[in-house]
Image (tube, coloured by chain):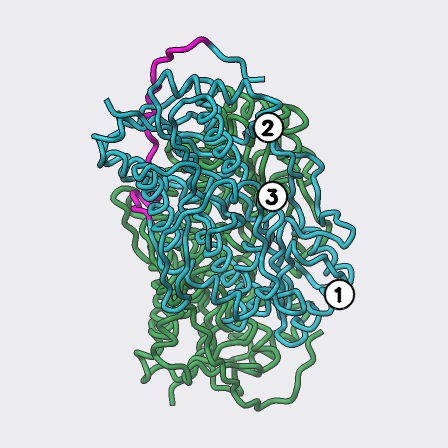
Chain colours: A green, B cyan
Amino acid sequence: MPANAFYAQSGGVTSVINASACGVIETARRHPDRIGRVLAGRNGILGALAEDLIDTSLESEAAIAALRSTPAGAFGSCRYKLKSLEKNRREYERLIEVFKAHDIGYFFYNGGGDSADTCFKVSQLSQSMGYPLQAIHVPKTIDNDLPLTDCCPGFGSVAKYVAVSTIEASLDVRSMAATSTKVFVLEVMGRHAGWIAAAGGLAAHQGIPVVILFPEIPFDREAFLARVDGYVKSHGYCSVVVSEGCHHPDGSFLAEQGSKDAFGHAQLGGAAPVVAQIVKDALGHKFHWAVADYLQRSARHIASATDVRQAYELGQRAVELALEGRNAVMPTIERLSDEPYSYRLGSAPLDAVANTEKFMPRDFISEDGFGITEAGRRYLLPLIQGEDYPDYKNGLPVYVSLENHTVPRRLPVFEIK
Amino acid sequence: MPANAFYAQSGGVTSVINASACGVIETARRHPDRIGRVLAGRNGILGALAEDLIDTSLESEAAIAALRSTPAGAFGSCRYKLKSLEKNRREYERLIEVFKAHDIGYFFYNGGGDSADTCFKVSQLSQSMGYPLQAIHVPKTIDNDLPLTDCCPGFGSVAKYVAVSTIEASLDVRSMAATSTKVFVLEVMGRHAGWIAAAGGLAAHQGIPVVILFPEIPFDREAFLARVDGYVKSHGYCSVVVSEGCHHPDGSFLAEQGSKDAFGHAQLGGAAPVVAQIVKDALGHKFHWAVADYLQRSARHIASATDVRQAYELGQRAVELALEGRNAVMPTIERLSDEPYSYRLGSAPLDAVANTEKFMPRDFISEDGFGITEAGRRYLLPLIQGEDYPDYKNGLPVYVSLENHTVPRRLPVFEIK
């Protein structure tokens, strides 16, 4: 009997993480001689700790195929970061115990930088415990901040959503500017890296006066107001795309809700109304603001076809890497050319991936800090190419909900502390 | 020489108001024996007052055709309400003067309830001044609150956006709920009528636990919290769609920014964070919130094909009504059947349309006030049917910007007070 595989989704979900799941499961199913069943963690790694496993082999081919066009996490995700091996060896050992109990020889972990770290540690521990396990990380993050890969699945679709929304809302405010709203502020995600905000800069190429507020560039109130004022004078209106991670020179965020998530990151939100009020107070312009929040990362209806394809391919490649005997690696996108866009799949060792954030290169951000350069545009544009519409029924997209049958437990209950 | 036509866009724009413009202009162009050029007001009725007219006859057929898939107002709109005839007869007389100077015999005004009122007054005055003018109102409002028509162009597309976004974000929060966000709050537009918020209720039919907060139903904090608590206990998560017009029993809005627009309506925004905080304080759940604002009404990329078609047809029908010799009327949608959906075009006299708001019928709202009934669903569903995707180039939608050539002035400058 070939070993089973474990697959789990980690951290904030995206509109294409299920496309990676689809790539993993469909590829594993094509190798029944090498891989048994794919067992998914219910709610991510918590499912492994709690031995709450989903038997994906009970899902129909059609249901698995439909994952490719279904947003969010079909098996549930979690924000739960395993502590270091030293501080909580018990949890890592439990994982190995569960894997052992369910004949799991492959560990596919689909997430961002934190989960790359977990994946690496599990791989290390399995070696030190003499348990044969191939741990492969499948990249996923709308923040696009993983190193050693040209881009991360999830990002291209958010970028497309932000670029399209910025263009559409800008046409709206342009229509209203003579007598009403002159400034529109859109808040987008991106804690530390401004990749998502940068996508709003693609609107500038269509003649739209757009100011980007990056987390990489400390907020300069006077320079910002001068730029907005200039655009309102020259174009009659101005759009602003502000990253939730935009902060003052002293490091404090424009908007902080004060609470922190499970990974210890500050939970942000509400930069848009702050920026809008700054404009109103200084320049007197009527404003509107929007906060896209989850809408941007779940908007499968406007996903980038390039992103969907890459998400699938990286899931597929993760399984192939495992079959090639690789361990503690992550499949990557290696860009070969901007235009025409071409890329190939590569791989990176997990110890080099884990816990490293990739920021926007400074030369992607315009000198004044409020826009993107031609280099930035050349980077972004391929990632939003193509539309990959879901099917619709009765006016609404057809998204699949899996049956998610639970695998019978074989171990005593484990208390998650 | 046949008389020219004047066309203007009024009030908040929509993703399909240009489809109505397209219907007006293309239909007028098919009757060169009866209608000369279509002159558009730059920035709505202000363009008529200022004699700032755009000659649409100089736009190519392709550019006019592209209006059908371009959101917002191609000629600019405005929030400018003419005062009563008694208080500012001077402005109405100026309109007639400009119409006379440019041989305008047809007045097509594309807007909501306020502009229906203006359109009616212009019609009255032209009669009393002995100037032959046919004034036809083309309905437009995302708020769907015009009487005597089954629905208003612009609404169906917002409804589709809200329903799709609610479903997508709900799948996201469902994925995260085990360890993180349990409640997602989406704020949508709709000052007094809950039509837009109601569209979020379409998600319930897909098994999503969604609570709708209507402006028609005074906010009942305890009942609301009990409903959210119940859903989190039964489903693990809950989505809330709150109308910007949701208010406390004493009439005060959940979120008021304090400022008012040109029509004297309170400018709203920020109900979502208020609702999210209420949940957090009482139940302790982690939340996310989004404010869709302009994104919802400019989202041409996810427009309802039914809405686009009706917007075009009502523009077309407005011109046909004028050619039939009608005056002071508005073309309407008369629903014949919910399923299969069928409708015919009718017309309504403007004096019956002006300044009347159509609220949600109580029997479209569930008894507890937090959802929609089967009757509400049967009303909404036909309006979101079909997708009408714009063309894309380089990953972004192709929206047209017209050349908007100005018609030479023939009158002295008029001071707009």
Q: Is residue B94 left or right of residue B63?
A: right
**Residue at (72%, 58%) from the top-left corner?**
B219
Residue A352 seen in the current view:
no
| Badges 3 and 2, same chain | no
x and y, in percent, of residue A91 in the image = 64, 75
Q: Is residue A49 left or right of residue A321?
A: right
Q: Residue at x 66, y 86 (%)?
A: A413
Chain for numbered disc 3: A
Q: Which residues are magenta?
A: B390-412
Q: Position of residue B84 (x, y in %)?
A: 59, 28
Chain bearing tag 2 is: B
* Residue A400 image offset from top left, x and y in percent: 43, 72
Disc ID at residue A372: none
Towards the viewer: A146 or B411: B411
Q: Which mark is residue A245?
A: 3
Question: Mark 2 against mark 1, which lies toward the viewer?
Answer: 2
Q: Which residue is mark 2?
A: B84
Hey, what amino acid is under mark 1?
Leu
The residue under label 1 is B283
